[in-house]
Image (cartoon, helix red, strand yellow):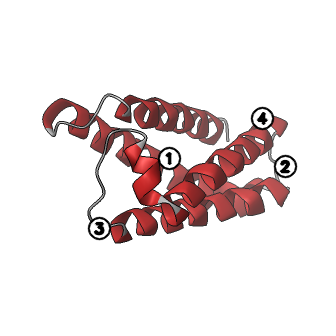
Amino acid sequence: MTKISSGLRTLFLVHFVVGLVFGLLYLLIPGIFMGWFGISVPDDLPYRIIGAAILAFTASSWYCYKAAEWERVKIVVLAEIVWTVLNVLVGLYGLLFAGQPAAEWINVIMMAGFAVAFTYFYSKK
């Protein structure tokens, strides 16, 4: 079995911490959190569902951080690539065509960074 690299383990840990913060903000205080970026939240349920999804990916990153073999984390890395790339595409659409506030660039840049990092580690295997 191929061991996962220390760089990938670190990426999982960083993803866990970032995901925990953002996931909890979306889940617990979506109206306040989105208000920081000038977004009004008339119905907080969709944002809470986003928070739950982020926390699910966060949990998978924690489990992968604790794993030692590439075969045990490979499918999560693939899922992270899909999630982050789609997130970037949707964010860019929102910024360019749907009038999202400039603060959306934070999400786009962060997710693009994760997409590049996960793709890099996937391509090394």
Residue 32 image offset from top left, x and y in percent: 45, 52
Asked whether the viewer can see residue 66, the reply is yes
Mark 3 crowd level (few <14, some 14–19, many ≥20, 10 Å Cα) = few
- Eye-nearest disc, 4 or 3: 3
Mark 2: amino acid: Lys
**Residue designated by label 2:** 3
Residue at disc 1, secondary structure: helix
Query: Cα distance, mark 1 to mark 3?
Result: 29 Å
Q: Earlier in the sequence, mark 4 or mark 3?
A: 4
Q: Decide which of 77, 63 is in the foreground and name it.
A: 63
- Eye-nearest disc, 2 or 1: 1
Mark 4 crowd level (few <14, some 14–19, many ≥20, 10 Å Cα) = few
Mark 4: amino acid: Gly
- Eye-nearest disc, 3 or 2: 3
Q: Decide which of 113, 32 is in the foreground and name it.
A: 32
- Eye-nearest disc, 2 or 4: 4
**Residue designated by label 4:** 7
Mark 1: amino acid: Ile
**Residue designated by label 1:** 81
Q: Is residue 81 above or below residue 48?
A: above
Query: Cα distance, mark 1 to mark 4?
Result: 16 Å
Residue 98 image offset from top left, x and y in percent: 15, 40
Query: Cα distance, mark 3 to mark 2?
Result: 45 Å
- Eye-nearest disc, 1 or 3: 3
The residue positioned 70% from the left and 58% from the top of the image is: 73
Numbered label attached to residue 43: 3
Q: Earlier in the sequence, mark 3 or mark 2?
A: 2
Query: Cα distance, mark 2 to mark 4?
Result: 12 Å
Q: Earlier in the sequence, mark 2 or mark 1?
A: 2
In contact (CB < 8 Å): disc 3 and disc 2 = no
The residue positioned 50% from the left and 60% from the top of the image is: 29
